[in-house]
Image (tube, rainbow, N blue to C red):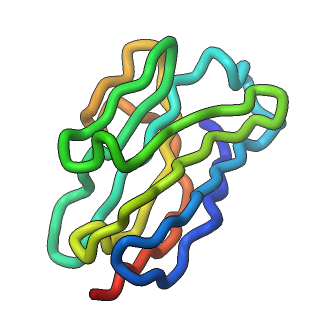
């Protein structure tokens, strides 16, 4: 398991931007750079859905492609999600996940999660 802590959520108007951060604890069996890191989100009454992941390459959900950018700083054990052109339908709790090299777009393929950070986009 990896301890993860998200930050950067908040309230923003449609068309605005936010940058989420997720810091992994240095007290971990895993080498951060070897982990696949992902962002998922969960809106009220809905299942947790994939947003983006970064391992050897990046991959995005169609709904955020061209608007969101995932990146990582291995020296800081941190992964980021830059969110631009936000829409009301992006409103959700955003979760950071850590998985192995085979982690895909399924939440079940990630073994560690943060507590989440709320993103609210007003129209």
Residue visible at 72% across and 19% down? Answer: 31
Residue 30 in view in this figure? no
Within the image, what quadrant is residue 76 found in? top right
Q: Is residue 74 left or right of residue 6?
A: right
Q: Quadrant of the N terminus?
A: top right
Q: Is residue 14 left or right of residue 47?
A: right
Residue visible at 42% across and 32% down? Answer: 53
Within the image, what quadrant is residue 94 found in? bottom left
Residue 106 rendering spot, x and y as whole percentages: 25, 35
Within the image, what quadrant is residue 89 found in? bottom left
Q: Is residue 66 left or right of residue 24?
A: left
Q: Is residue 34 above or below residue 72?
A: above
Residue nearest the viewer, comparing 102 with 10: 10
Residue 23 in view in this figure? yes
Residue nearest the viewer, comparing 84 with 52: 84
Residue visible at 52% across and 33% down? Answer: 37
Residue 10 rendering spot, x and y as whole percentages: 53, 79
Q: Quadrant of the C terminus?
A: bottom left
Residue 85 rendering spot, x and y as whole percentages: 37, 62
Q: Is residue 46 above or below residue 14?
A: above
Q: Is residue 85 above or below residue 75?
A: below
Residue 35 rendering spot, x and y as whole percentages: 58, 22
């Amino acid at each position: 398991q990896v301890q993860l802590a998200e930050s950067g959520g908040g309230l923003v108007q449609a068309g605005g931007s936010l940058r989420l951060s997720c810091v992994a604890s240095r007290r971990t069996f895993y080498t951060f750079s070897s982990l696949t890191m992902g962002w998922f989100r969960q809106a009220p009454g809905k299942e947790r859905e994939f947003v983006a992941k970064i391992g050897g390459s990046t991959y995005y959900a169609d709904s955020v492609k061209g608007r969101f950018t995932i990146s990582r700083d291995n020296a800081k054990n941190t992964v980021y999600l830059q969110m631009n052109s936000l829409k009301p339908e992006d409103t959700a709790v955003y979760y950071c996940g850590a998985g192995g090299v085979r982690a895909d777009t399924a939440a079940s393929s990630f073994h560690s999660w943060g507590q989440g950070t709320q993103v609210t986009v007003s129209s």
